[in-house]
Image (cartoon, helix red, strand yellow):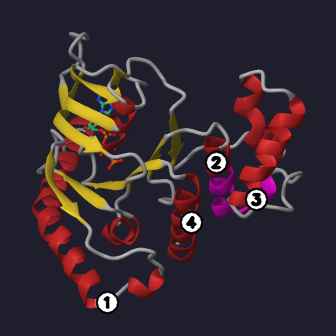
Amino acid sequence: MLELHNLSKTYGLNDSSVSTVNAVDGIDLMVEEGEFVSIIGPTGCGKSTLFELIGALIDPTEGEVRIEDDPVTEPDERIGMVFQDTSTFPWLSVIENVEFGLKMNGVPKTERRDRAREMIDLVGLSGFEEASPTELSGGMNQRVAIARTLVMNPDIILMDEPFGALDEQTRLILGEELLRIWRETGATILFVTHSINEAVHLSDRIAVMSARPGRFKEIVENPLPRPRTDDILGRDEYNDIVNRLWDELRAESKKGLQQKMEEEAQEYGAPEGA
Ligand SMILES: Nc1ncnc2c1ncn2[C@@H]1O[C@H](COP(=O)(O)OP(=O)(O)OP(=O)(O)O)[C@@H](O)[C@H]1O
């Protein structure tokens, strides 16, 4: 089980020259092994900060992360991460990209090649082992990034808008592929998305974050049965949950946009007469 206890982050506390930003405040969450939980929230509400805290890439101001009751205080092999802009190494082939982490861990060549091939197959890239990432589309590069994370065999995968830069059809197809991979690996997935539809399509539960400071406003159980394909899109029970989430999110999104405009006005200076 992954547990988040009162997780909070205020930036700038130790730097007297900047103002502080209370990004994430008092997040509590218990995620069961093999669960798929999405996090949706307005722009700038602290979703990426939350993932950086879970991955121990930054230290919390308060609170803690536990896996199987062990506190996580530094990057942990049981946690893998995939970002929107996860960059593949353009000077390496697809298979060299996928086996990179294993090589760094000193896994012998034959074993790492075998494991990398298995993951390349799992993400649907068989036949592209020797290709350069520069020859591949954005969606295929995200498949490489997913394979590179999966090959390390993490128990928990944090995905921060992994399909955010892709067009809608590719997103839908990769979402379905992700559900298949999730079933086959049994991994626990935490998935940040701006898309309510994507969250409903994929998740067991959906946590709705408030505008900054980011807190969980509501955690909604998704009643849609599995296995799910895109056939569920547009059904009454699908629309019901989408509408419910949008009701939760609407006011927060307005607040988030307002905060963003205020931040930008401070950064660039308000236009004259504004
Ligand atoms: N290193 C940092 N130092 C200071 N402030 C930061 C830092 N990183 C993020 N912030 C601020 O913390 C708040 C939350 O940022 P974060 O990137 O976690 O939000 P987000 O929900 O992921 O945003 P988006 O929806 O735009 O991806 C924002 O106001 C941001 O400006």
Q: Is residue 135 magenta?
A: yes
Query: Which of the labelled discs sits on residue 121, or is there none?
Result: 3
Q: Answer with left or right where residue 133 lies relative to residue 85.
A: right
- Give the secondary structure at mark 2: helix
Give the labeled residue for mark 1.
Answer: 235
* Count of marks overlaid on the render: 4
Could you tell which of marks 2 and 4 lies nearer the N-terminus?
Answer: 2
Query: Which of the labelled discs sits on residue 214, or is there none?
Result: none
- Give the secondary structure at mark 4: helix
Dot 2 crowding, Cα within 10 Å, few <14, some 14–19, many 20+ = many
Against 218, residue 4 (above or below) is above
Q: Position of residue 69 (x, y in %)?
A: 32, 26
Query: Which of the labelled discs sits on residue 180, or is there none?
Result: 4
Say what amino acid the circle numbered 4 marks: Arg
Which tag is nearer the camera, tag 3 or tag 2?
A: 3
Give the labeled residue for mark 2.
Answer: 145
Which tag is nearer the camera, tag 1 or tag 4?
A: 4
